[in-house]
Every structure is written in structure tokens, then in C-alpha cells.
Image (cartoon, helix red, strand yellow):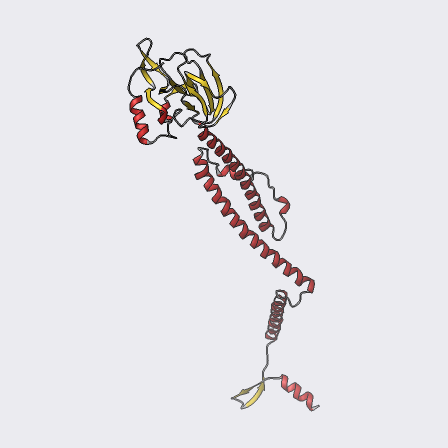
């Protein structure tokens, strides 16, 4: 009985009334008690929600399978980051190769640069990544896949470009080896450079006549050298005035002619390289003395051979020939 009285008294709160000089029980309005009750319920709910959120965001309530899946997911995310970084490095490398390709290689071989549109074309229009949509990491997966596709396209285009550069390099090398770039008779074997390209005096008619080659005066039997790689197209005496003569097709539009030979050292269809002996100086055909009449034809037009002696003459030797070739003297054929 005493226990119940004490318990009941403990639940009742008192305040001191100075007017009556006594303690009186505290009386709470019904509305206050109800509002306090609801505040308690809301506070309890929010506190419980906070605790639940904390538990859900930690591994405390996760099963071992869920923990394993989370670790695998984090590992995949880590691998994605590594792939993205590696893709960035590869993209930088291919960009550097593309820049050198356009500004160095293709420029050197006089080829048109490959535009960015050509390197990255073929990825517009249809949504080719629709099957990758609807996943938690779809955006990351689609972006990575797209970068891989573009990179693959750029590599294919660059590979084709390098194949083209290789062919151009081979042609360039072949061109440099084929262009007639040395004097057909060695300087020490020459008596003199008898007559140059241009207007000269015909030795038979004594009239002014256009001379379409250069005459090199030398002893009969002096070796004649091929000035560039090519194929012998003619080695006969069936061309009026030329006597025994040779024609070499060097490709790329270049043909050289060697006239008034004493004898041949090659035959029709034979391949020759720069520096090979193709024949010997003579005075056959329309000629007044042993010499070599030498012509260069480019795309069907006879041009001045003097512009091609870059492979075996010093600057002084070239200047001496230039002075002799500019004199309008008597030709030997």
C-alpha cells in the first residue's frame, strides 16, 4: 500500500504557491498532453528512421553474399576507372601519331592530310548502344564503349594512312633512284662539253637550228653510263640521224636518249641501274666527230639536261659546264 502511494506521488508534480504557503499539484491541459504525446511519437519515429538509415548504409545488417557483391561492385568500378585512364593514355598516343602523320609524313610526301571527320566518321544517326541502356552503370558503360569504338575507327584509318605513306615512300625512293641525275660521261673522260641545249649552228647546213640535247665530246669507245634506273626501250639505229642509239624509260614520265654510239652494252627490255655502262661513244648517224648526243624527255617534252647533273658534279664543275652550255656554238650533229 505504501508502495502504490509513493508511486502515485512520484507521478504527480507539485509547485510551491507563495500565496497559500503550500505545495499544489501541477495540472496539465488535455491538449498539451495530447501534443506532447504526438511529439514523442514523431521524435521516436525520426530517431528510429535515422538509426535504420545508419544501419542500412553500413555493413552491419548485410549478409555475407551482399558483402561479397558490394566488394565485387567496388572492384568493377575500380577496373572501370583503370580502363578509362588507359583509354585516355591510348587516345593521347593516337592523337600524337595522327598529328605527326598529317603535319610531317603526309606533308613530306605531298599527300593531303586526313581530316578529323574521316578519322571519327560512322558514329552518328542510329543509337547503336540501346542494348546497353537500363543498367545501374549504363551511362559509364555506354561512354566507355563509345570511346573504344571511336578509338578502333581511328586506328583503322591511321593504319590505312600509314600503308599509303609506305607506298608513297617506296615510290619516292623509286623516283629518286630513277630520275636521271648524273652526267652520262665522266668528267675526266671528256674532251669538252661541245654543245648545249638551245639554239646552235648546224654543222652541215651552217644555219641556226634548235638543239634539243647536249653534246659531250669524247674519244671513240668512251663508256656511257645510265644516269638513273630504268628499262631499255630501244637499242637500234632505226631513228633518222641518231645512228646507233639507246632509249631508256625511267618511269614517272622520264625518258633519256643516247645517240651516235659506237656499240651497245645493253639490249632492248633490259633493266639498268644508275651507273651501269650502257654503251660506248661513237660517231654513227648524222655526226661530224666522236661524241655523245644526250637528251632528256619528260612527259613527251624534251627538256634541258643541264638541270639534272646533281649527283656527280661539284659546284665548280657544274658552273664550268653551265658557261660552256650557254654559248651558241657549232654543234656536232
Q: Tell me which residue sits at (41%, 20%) in the image.
A: 221
Nearer-the-camera pick, 301 or 76? 301
Q: Tell me which residue sits at (55%, 46%) in the image.
A: 147
Quarter occupied by residue 4: bottom right
Nearer-the-camera pick, 125 or 170? 170
Nearer-the-camera pick, 141 or 296? 296
Quarter occupied by residue 284: top left
Vertically, is 295 above or below 139? Answer: above
Q: Is residue 256 visible?
A: no
Q: Position of residue 39 (x, y in %)?
A: 60, 71
Q: Position of residue 42 (x, y in %)?
A: 61, 69
- In the picture, the quarter occupied by the N terminus is bottom right
Nearer-the-camera pick, 257 or 44? 257
- In the picture, the quarter occupied by the C terminus is top left
Q: Position of residue 241 (x, y in %)?
A: 41, 11
Quarter occupied by residue 220: top left
Q: Position of residue 254 (x, y in %)?
A: 44, 23
Q: Is residue 151 visible?
A: yes
Q: Tell me which residue sits at (48%, 34%) in the image.
A: 169
Amino acid at each position: 500500500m505504501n508502495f502504490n502511494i509513493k508511486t502515485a506521488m512520484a507521478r504527480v508534480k507539485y509547485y510551491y504557491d507563495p500565496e497559500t504557503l503550500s505545495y499544489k499539484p501541477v495540472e496539465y491541459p488535455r491538449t498539451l498532453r495530447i501534443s506532447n504525446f504526438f511529439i514523442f511519437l514523431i521524435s521516436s519515429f525520426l530517431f528510429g528512421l535515422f538509426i535504420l538509415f545508419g544501419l542500412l548504409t553500413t555493413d552491419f545488417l548485410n549478409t555475407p553474399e551482399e558483402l561479397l557483391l558490394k566488394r565485387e561492385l567496388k572492384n568493377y568500378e575500380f577496373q572501370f576507372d583503370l580502363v578509362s585512364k588507359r583509354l585516355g593514355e591510348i587516345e593521347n598516343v593516337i592523337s600524337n601519331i595522327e598529328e605527326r602523320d598529317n603535319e610531317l609524313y603526309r606533308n613530306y610526301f605531298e599527300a593531303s592530310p586526313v581530316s578529323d571527320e574521316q578519322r571519327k566518321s560512322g558514329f552518328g544517326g542510329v543509337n547503336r548502344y540501346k542494348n546497353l541502356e537500363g543498367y545501374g552503370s549504363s551511362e559509364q558503360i555506354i561512354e566507355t564503349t563509345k570511346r573504344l569504338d571511336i578509338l578502333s575507327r581511328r586506328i583503322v584509318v591511321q593504319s590505312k594512312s600509314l600503308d599509303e605513306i609506305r607506298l608513297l615512300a617506296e615510290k619516292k625512293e623509286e623516283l629518286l633512284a630513277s630520275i636521271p641525275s648524273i652526267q652520262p660521261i665522266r668528267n675526266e673522260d671528256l674532251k669538252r662539253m661541245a654543245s648545249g641545249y638551245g639554239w646552235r649552228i648546224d654543222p652541215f647546213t651552217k644555219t641556226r637550228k634548235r638543239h634539243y640535247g647536249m653534246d659531250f665530246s669524247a674519244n671513240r669507245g668512251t663508256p656511257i653510263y645510265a644516269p638513273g634506273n630504268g628499262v631499255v626501250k630501244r637499242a637500234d639505229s632505226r631513228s633518222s640521224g641518231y645512228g646507233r642509239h639507246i632509249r631508256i624509260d625511267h618511269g614517272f614520265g622520264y625518258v633519256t636518249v643516247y645517240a651516235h654510239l659506237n656499240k651497245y652494252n645493253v639490249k632492248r627490255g633490259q633493266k639498268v641501274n644508275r651507273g651501269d655502262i650502257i654503251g660506248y661513244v661513237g660517231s654513227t648517224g648524222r655526226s661530224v666527230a666522236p661524241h655523245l648526243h644526250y637528251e632528256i624527255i619528260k612527259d613527251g617534252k624534251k627538256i634541258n639536261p643541264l638541270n639534272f647533273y646533281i649527283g656527280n658534279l661539284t659546284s665548280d664543275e657544274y658552273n664550268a659546264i653551265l658557261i660552256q652550255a650557254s654559248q651558241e656554238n657549232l654543234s656536232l650533229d
